[in-house]
Image (cartoon, helix red, strand yellow):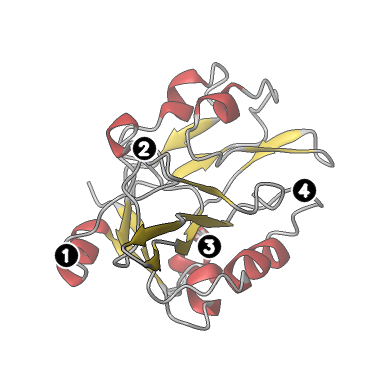
C-alpha cells in the first residue's frame, strides 16, 4: 500500500508558524483549533568547570500535525467508524457525517491530532490536504514553509531522501502508533522521553 507522510528538519525550522497559520486559514479553523502546531522545546542550564561556567542550554522547534500513522489508535477507538485509513495513500480521514463527537479519538491520539470543532460540534483533523495532492500539489503547510523545513510524499521515498530520521522530544514513543513522520534533528535535540527539557509554549499547542 502506498503510504504518504511528512518530514521536518528541525535545523531549518525557526518557529515562525507560517505552516500553522496557512493551514488554519485554508481549513477555516475556529479559534483554539490548529491542525498543525509548532512546539518550542527547551531546557538545560549552566555547569562549573574549575573557575569557568559553561552553558548546556538547548532549544528547538518541532512542527507537528497528524502523522497518518501506520497503526493509528484513533481509528481503533472510533465506534461510529468515522475515522478510516485510506488504502490508496495511507492518509487517515474523518467522515464528519458519521462523527458523534465522543472525543475518544482525541483522548487516544498521542499527537493530539483529532480536535473538537466548537462551531461544527464535530471532531476535525488534518487530512494531508488530500484535495491539493489529488491535483498534484503539496499540503499547504509544506508549500508555505519559508525555510523549506517541511516535506511531504511517499514515506519510502522520504526515507531515501532523508536517511537517519528519528523521533525527538517532545514527541512520544513512535512504537505506539508507527507515525509516518521523519525528523532531522539538530545536535542539541533530545531523544523522545527526555525529561531535561519542557515545552515552552504550552498555551499555543
- Counting residues from the start of the chain, the first of labels 2 and 4 encountered is 4
- Residue at the spot x=75%, y=59% of the render? 28
Of badges 2 and 3, the one in the foreground is: 2
In front of the other: 19 or 72: 19
Of badges 3 and 1, the one in the foreground is: 1
* Distance Cα–Cα, label 2 vs label 1: 22 Å
Residue, disc 4: 32
Which labelled disc corresponds to residue 131?
A: 3
Which labelled disc corresponds to residue 36?
A: none
- Residue at the spot x=31%, y=62% of the render? 49
Of badges 2 and 4, the one in the foreground is: 2
Q: Are circles 4 and 3 on residues that touch, CB within 8 Å? A: no
- Counting residues from the start of the chain, the first of labels 2 and 1 encountered is 1
In front of the other: 7 or 187: 187
Residue 132 in the image, given as x and y percentages of width and height: 51, 68
Q: Secondary structure at mark 4?
A: loop
- Counting residues from the start of the chain, the first of labels 4 and 1 encountered is 4
Which labelled disc corresponds to residue 193?
A: 2
* Distance Cα–Cα, label 2 vs label 3: 35 Å
Amino acid at each position: 500500500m502506498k503510504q504518504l507522510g511528512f518530514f521536518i528538519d528541525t535545523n531549518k525550522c525557526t518557529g515562525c508558524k507560517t505552516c500553522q497559520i496557512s493551514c488554519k486559514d485554508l481549513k477555516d479553523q475556529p479559534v483554539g483549533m490548529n491542525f498543525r502546531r509548532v512546539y518550542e522545546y527547551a531546557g538545560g542550564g549552566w555547569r562549573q568547570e574549575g573557575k569557568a561556567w559553561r552553558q548546556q542550554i538547548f532549544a528547538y522547534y518541532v512542527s507537528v500535525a497528524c502523522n497518518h500513522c501506520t497503526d493509528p489508535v484513533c481509528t481503533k477507538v472510533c465506534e461510529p467508524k468515522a475515522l478510516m485509513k485510506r488504502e490508496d495513500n495511507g492518509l487517515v480521514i474523518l467522515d464528519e457525517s458519521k462523527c458523534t463527537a465522543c472525543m475518544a479519538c482525541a483522548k487516544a491520539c498521542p499527537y493530539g491530532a483529532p480536535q473538537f470543532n466548537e462551531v461544527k460540534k464535530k471532531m476535525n483533523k488534518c487530512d494531508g490536504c488530500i484535495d491539493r495532492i489529488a491535483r498534484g500539489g503539496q499540503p499547504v503547510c509544506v508549500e508555505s514553509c519559508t525555510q523549506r523545513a517541511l516535506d511531504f510524499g511517499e514515506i519510502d521515498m522520504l526515507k531515501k531522501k532523508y536517511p537517519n530520521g528519528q523521533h525527538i522530544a517532545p514527541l512520544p514513543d513512535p512504537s505506539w502508533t508507527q507515525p509516518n513522520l521523519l525528523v532531522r534533528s539538530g545536535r542539541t535535540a533530545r531523544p523522545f522521553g527526555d525529561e531535561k527539557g519542557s515545552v515552552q509554549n504550552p498555551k499555543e499547542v
